Amino acid sequence: MQKQIDSNILEYLNITKGLYLILDENSNIIFANEQACKILGVSQEKIVSMNWVDSFIPQELKSYIANIIKEIANKNMQINRYVENEILTLNGERKFISWKNSFVEREGKVTQVICSGEDITEKREIQKYIEEKEERLKAIFDFSPLGILISDKTGKMIEANLAFLNMLGYSQDEILGKSYLDITHSDYLDLNEDHFNRLIDNEIGMYKITKRYITKNNELLWGNVTVSTIKDEFNEILYVLAIIEDITQMKKREEDIIAQRKFLHTIIDENPNIIIVKDYEGRFVLVNQAIARLYNTTTEDMIGKSDGDYNPNEDQVKHYLQSVQEIMDLDETKLVYEESTDILTGKIRYFQSIKKPITDRYGNKQLLIIANDITDIKEAQKKLKDNEEMIHHQSKMAAMGEMLENIAHQWRQPLSVITTSASSVKIHKEMGTLSDDFLDEVLDAIVKSGNHLSQTIDDFRDFFKPDKEKVRFNIKNTYKKALFLVSSKLKNREIDIIENIEDIDLYGFDNELVQVIMNLINNARDALEESSLEYKYIFIDIYKDKENNIILKICDNAGGIPVNVIGKIFEPYFTTKHKSLGTGIGLYMCEEILVKHMNGEIAVKNKEFEYEGNSFKGAEFTLKIPILESLED
């Protein structure tokens, strides 16, 4: 369509500063000059395919503008009068345009609507600003939270806003006519007067000071004051304008912050833990006395330096820097265990350190390190481990003594059979009465006894095999094994064992559980031997509870454990027996095995119960052992 318009006219329209549009009677764009396209944010090639109302008129004005164009096309509207309305650019920005509209008529019919526009967005904003300026200034003066004071060239106050009056406690009438010096603290009179005189003499255009005022009630008020002048068109000073910010509370907070910083610095410095802040290169940004003592220097000397300036151990220094950079790169808090050399003593010390990436107020990445010296703890743990190993050894030795005694009991009868049989053969041979049948009978007895001895050795040897790893085993078989190993000490003691045992598999250390059951049966036996009861019982209950745990209960009727010691029986070396009869490590080892090796529990209580019409009281030990998922799988 643009080709239908004279090229000279197009060239002229393109260089004009105004907006120029040609529309058809349906608001389709036939032509838009370069200025219009620039404001609308669309090319001249693209805009001719667009509808003016649909593409560039705000929704709330579409009907109104479409009607105007329709009225022009119908020649029902006076042309060449201004119409002002908002338009939308392609990116959604609103512009205010003042239009003059005309049309082109052919054969009595309007074929084109001519729109000539001027962007008056800025003019309207300026006009609006001017209109609102006085109201804003008045509102600022009246309702500003800052104090505003207007004085003449001598410093006499002409007007003050409500905020300033409230600051000092004066009314408007009371403040008028006073000099700014009348309300200034004596410490700031000279400084204030010097700045004011330089301002009035045009040596400076404005000044800022922090000063103290005296209120009507003779209280002190801190203020940040900005002072400038109001001049006429001849650059003559008419008034002096002061804007005052009440910073009394801020000053108080500053004093509190300074006091808090000193307090915090004291806490950091006196903290026994090492506290450090490092930058990415490992340089010290903050240190406390603990690290300074370790490196035999001062906190002031360490700032800006690194571990390599103090620690001669190059491997440690390299590790520290690598750790700093790795944690800062990952941006994750880490708990690490490290060693450091005490420069004064040369001793290696051990630390548990929390390392947390932080950012300073300038956005620089840093690392906060809080290191707890655990050297004494590690040494105590080593001693504890040595003591535990000794207790384990003592427990095994005690168990070995029990086993040797049991072996002796188990071997007495078969050895007696063997020696008696050999003696009988020898006597019959000397007397010439040795028959083949008798010899076969005697040899069978010797072989049977020898096999019994061999089986006994295998059973006791299995007990002393160390448990290297957890295995699947049957609790009933484990109990029977433990009972066999202590059976020799139960014979001829008139102790009845009452069993209620379920057949259950579990996963764990078979031999260690054998040792636990043996200890508990032996303790029950010893307690029963010391009693003068007519009936002596040991009750064994083994079953699975609802939480999929094996419950093993061993209860006697020996009268129970004294109340004053029942809470101590799992402590190492605590025993209620005579020193010649016990070491006090049996129950301690039972708890160690169950808790640490089998994730189980052991508890004891005194229990009163009835059995076969008789009432009894005794100690009941309850073992709770989880059946692990690996077994169930």
Image (spheres, rainbow, N blue to C red):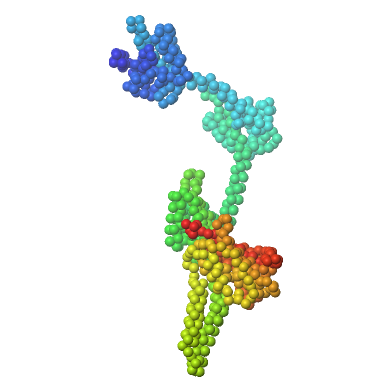
**Quarter holding residue 319:** bottom left
At horizontal 68% and vertical 71% (from top left) the residue drawn is 535
Q: Nearer the viewer, residue 345 or 202?
A: 345
Quarter of the image with the N terminus in it? top left
Using the image, determine if residue 416 lies above or below residue 388: below
Give the total of numbered labels: 0
Q: Is residue 576 rendered to the left or right of residue 321?
A: right
Using the image, determine if residue 325 lies above or below residue 236: below
Q: Nearer the viewer, residue 104 or 451?
A: 451
Q: Is residue 498 visible in the rendered structure shown here?
A: yes
At horizontal 49% and vertical 53% (from top left) the residue drawn is 334
Where in the figure is residue 450, as x and y percent of width and height? Answer: 49, 81
Where in the figure is residue 40, as x and y percent of width and height? Answer: 39, 22
Q: Nearer the viewer, residue 453 or 263?
A: 453
**Quarter holding residue 189:** top right
At horizontal 55% and vertical 68% (from top left) the residue drawn is 479
Where in the figure is residue 81, as x and y percent of width and height? Answer: 44, 10
Q: Nearer the viewer, residue 308 or 91?
A: 91
At horizontal 48% and vertical 82% (from top left) the residue drawn is 444
Where in the figure is residue 582, as x and y percent of width and height? Answer: 62, 74
Q: Is residue 318 rendered to the left or right of residue 544?
A: left
View extreme (top): residue = 108
Q: Is residue 151 visible in the rendered structure shown here?
A: no
**Quarter holding residue 373:** bottom right
